[in-house]
């Protein structure tokens, strides 16, 4: 472990995002040191490439960490939030499909720890959200439809990113409707369409590689260390 690297806990480590996080963190040992990898089911191996693995049921036994990164499922969210509260550590979460009660618990936890939850950690989507708000404000009365496409394994619909883009549309005065497609191995596509009489605008973001989300989450985790309690946005942690 490098003395100046950020000690990271990865929650949801056996998943698609977890694997990307482990690989990208290992490529930058001077910045990140994964001190615990937590999986929903008991891990097949206790140590992989020097990283200790834990089952979700063993969460209380993980060693000290500077920040936790959670890309799991809604049922895994409450325990990792409780762990971060108990340890006074920041939490970076990209888990989507959280319930209203979980979102309230997140807001309450932000009184004691630094938190960032985002439906999408990519820079492109942050820019798209701004464009959507601007288009909605400039096109009153136009129909606004958000169509999201993801791989067949994605459980929640509409996607968290679609809902975030919908909030931007609402902030601009539109009333968005949602449609979801689940097909093949699509990493993530979001189309925001504005339709008026005789014309149409389509704003699209296509993710072709989930490394963009993992990279953003690792960056956010390093930036969260030492911050005052509160809820941060991805854009607060850029630069
Ligand atoms: P996945 O199904 O491949 O992996 C899920 C992981 O969570 C696995 O490691 C599994 O063992 C673990 N898990 C399941 N139940 C658990 C529990 N109770 N406690 C602890 N761990 C548990 O999913 P994925 O494609 O890696 O996506 C994970 C989450 O991240 C989803 O909610 C997805 O929508 C979201 N996601 C967010 C972004 C973003 O930028 N915010 C990007 C991609 C995916």
Image: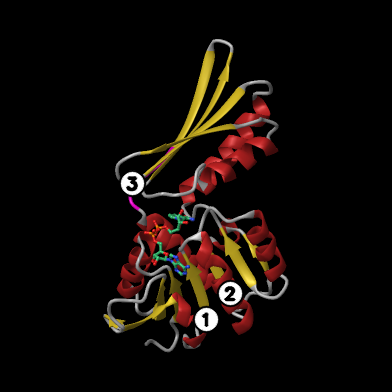
Q: Position of residue 156 (x, y in %)?
A: 49, 48
| Mark before the other along the chain sequence, 2 or 1 | 1
| Mark before the other along the chain sequence, 1 or 3 | 1
Q: Which residue is mark 1?
A: 66
Q: Which residue is mark 3?
A: 208
Q: Position of residue 234 (x, y in %)?
A: 56, 58
* Residue drawn at point x = 45 percent, y = 85 percent: 4
Q: Which residue is nearer to you in this view: 6 or 76?
A: 76
**Contact (CB < 8 A) between labels 2 and 3?**
no
Count of numbered labels shown in the rendering:
3
Alpha-carbon span between mark 1 and mark 3: 30 Å
User: Quarter of the image containing the N terminus?
Assistant: bottom left
Check disc 1: other Cα within 10 Å, few if <14, some if 14-19, many if 20+: many
**Tag 3 secondary structure:** loop
Q: Which residue is mark 2?
A: 90
Colouring scheme applied when the structure was drawn: secondary structure
Alpha-carbon span between mark 2 and mark 1: 7 Å
| Mark before the other along the chain sequence, 2 or 3 | 2
Judged by its main secondary structure, the magenta piece is strand
Residue 89 visible in rendering: yes
**Tag 1 secondary structure:** loop
Indicate the quadrant where residue 48 lies: bottom left
Check disc 3: other Cα within 10 Å, few if <14, some if 14-19, many if 20+: few
Indicate the quadrant where residue 40 lies: bottom left
Q: Which residue is nearer to you in this view: 132 or 186?
A: 186
Mark 3 sits near ligand 1, with its Cβ under 8 Å away: no
Q: Which residue is nearer to you in this view: 204 or 30?
A: 204
* Residue drawn at point x = 38 percent, y = 71 percent: 41
Please report the bounds of the magenta region as a residue range.
Answer: 205-209
**Contact (CB < 8 A) between labels 2 and 1?**
yes
- The picture quadrant for ligand 1 comes to bottom left
**232 in magenta:** no
């Amino acid at each position: 472990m490098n003395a100046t690297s950020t000690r990271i806990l990865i929650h949801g480590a056996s998943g698609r995002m977890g694997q990307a996080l482990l690989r990208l963190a290992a490529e930058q040992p001077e910045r990140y040191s994964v001190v615990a990898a937590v999986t929903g089911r008991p891990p097949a191996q206790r140590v992989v490439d020097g990283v200790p693995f834990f089952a979700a049921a063993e969460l209380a036994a993980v060693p000290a960490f500077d920040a936790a990164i959670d890309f799991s499922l809604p049922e895994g969210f409450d325990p990792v939030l409780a762990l971060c509260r108990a340890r006074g550590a920041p939490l970076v979460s990209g888990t989507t499909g959280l319930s209203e009660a979980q979102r309230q618990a997140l807001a309450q936890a932000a009184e004691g720890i630094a938190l960032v939850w985002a439906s999408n950690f990519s820079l492109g989507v942050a820019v798209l959200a701004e464009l959507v708000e601007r288009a909605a404000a400039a096109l009153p009365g136009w129909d606004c439809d958000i169509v999201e496409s993801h791989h067949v394994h994605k459980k929640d619909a509409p996607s968290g990113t679609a809902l975030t883009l919908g909030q931007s549309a609402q902030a601009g005065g539109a009333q968005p409707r949602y449609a979801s497609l689940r097909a093949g191995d699509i990493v993530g596509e979001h189309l925001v369409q504005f339709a008026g009489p005789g014309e149409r605008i389509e704003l699209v973001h296509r993710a072709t590689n989930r490394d963009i989300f993992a990279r953003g989450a690792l960056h956010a985790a390093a930036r969260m260390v030492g911050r005052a309690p509160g809820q941060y946005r991805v854009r607060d942690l850029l630069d």
